Image (tube, rainbow, N blue to C red):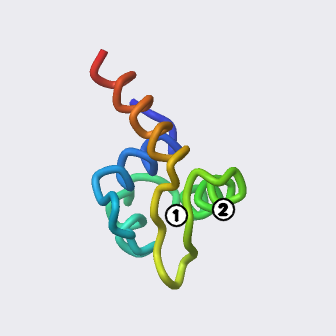
Amino acid sequence: DTSVKGEILILLHSHFPERASQSAILSAMSARSSGSVRNRLGEMRIAKLIHGDSKVGYRLTQSGYQAALAEIRLLIS
């Protein structure tokens, strides 16, 4: 179990260095509320964990990549 933010980080890590479209993210996270996913994407963009927007897709920044690694480590420990 992980937070919506953690799940987005892990998902984008699996696409890194490519971008993931918002529709692909929403589809992969269909068990989560789409509004919640969109809200976290906006918060993560402001926090500079991700780069992009709903039109071009999203990609991890360097700090986002490190945060994704930390989430992955928590899941496998």
User: Which numbered marker is on residue 8?
Assistant: none
57 with respect to 72 (left or right) = right
Give coordinates of residue 43: x percent, y percent. 68, 54
Residue type at mark 2: give it.
Answer: Gly
Give coordinates of residue 27: x percent, y percent. 35, 67
Residue extending furthest toward the top: 77
27 lies above or below 14: below
Task: Give the residue drawn at x 37%, y 60%.
Answer: 30
* Residue neighbourhood size for the residue with mark 2, other residues' Cα within 10 Å, grouped as few (<14), some (14–19), many (≥20): some
Residue type at mark 1: give it.
Answer: Ser
Residue extending furthest toward the right: 46
Tags 1 and 2 touching, CB below 8 Å: no
Residue at numbered disc 2: 42
Give coordinates of residue 32: x percent, y percent. 46, 53
User: How far apart, in angstroms, are the residues tagged by discs 1 and 2?
Assistant: 12 Å
Secondary structure, mark 1, is helix
Q: Quadrant of residue 20?
A: bottom left
Judging depth in this view, the residue of 31 and 52 nearest the camera is 52
Task: Give the residue drawn at x 45%, y 51%.
Answer: 8
Task: Give the residue drawn at x 32%, y 60%.
Answer: 28
47 lies above or below 23: above
Secondary structure, mark 2, is helix
Task: Give the residue drawn at x 39%, y 30%.
Answer: 1
19 with respect to 15 (left or right) = right
Residue at numbered disc 1: 34
Choose mark 1 or mark 2, whichever is in front.
2
* Residue neighbourhood size for the residue with mark 1, other residues' Cα within 10 Å, grouped as few (<14), some (14–19), many (≥20): some
Q: Quadrant of residue 17?
A: bottom left
Q: Quadrant of the C terminus?
A: top left
**Mark 1 vs mark 2: which is more N-terminal?**
1
